Amino acid sequence: MADSARPQFGQLDAGLLCRERPSAYGIALQGARMALVEVTLPGKASFFDLPGGGVDEGEAETEGLIREFGEETGLIVRPGPLITRAAQYMVSAHQELFNSLGAFYEVVVEGMDETLQSEPTHVLVWLSPHEALRRLRHDSHAWAVATWLRGR
């Protein structure tokens, strides 16, 4: 479970067990707009997330961040400073419960390579940070954006 330096979001019903999954997400700007992914799954309403996701075994956090950004958006990014850490209980597309141990970084967009994008359910959108706060699906993502805004 989350440590005292990493706030925990979401609820876990008593008696349920879930695995912990290291993850990394990024805040990328283009002018005054922030990169988000709009995710549309078959038969469900779309939702917005920060680009990023699970860090694979043996992969550094920043390596996972770069890979996930490319897979979800086609953007080539360079990780900057760590903004914060936060955990969120989530359910995967395969209905698996896990605790996402998220690291949230500032990232610099260095280019675009659409051949990197491999997730057809994810579409890159650019929103103002305040609009992102309203629309982000996960409380941990909104909390990271708010933390980033307060530090600017």
Image (cartoon, helix red, strand yellow):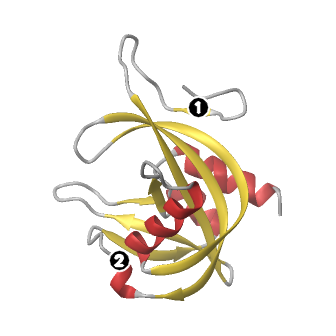
Q: Residue at x 27, y 67 (%)?
A: 121
Please identify the quarter of the rendering in which residue 90 is found: top left
Q: In this view, does 59 lie above or below 68?
A: above
Please identify the quarter of the rendering in which residue 83 is found: bottom right
Q: Is mark 1 on a helix, strand or loop?
A: strand
Q: Residue at x 54, y 54 (%)?
A: 24
Q: Which label sits on residue 8?
A: 1
As drawn, is 53 to the left or to the right of 27?
left
Residue named by callout 2 = 117
Residue 115, given in percent of the width and then of the height, sits at 34, 85
Disc on the earlier residue, 1 or 2 = 1
Number of numbered markers: 2
Residue 86, given in percent of the width and then of the height, sits at 61, 41
Q: In which quarter of the image is the N terminus?
A: top right
Q: Is residue 128 above or below residue 61?
A: below
Q: Quadrant of the C terminus?
A: bottom right
- Give the residue type at disc 2: Gln
Crowd rating for badge 2 (residues with CA inside 10 Å; few <14, some 14–19, many 20+): some
* Residue situated furthest front in the rendering: 58
Residue 98, given in percent of the width and then of the height, sits at 39, 34
Q: Is mark 2 on a helix, strand or loop?
A: loop
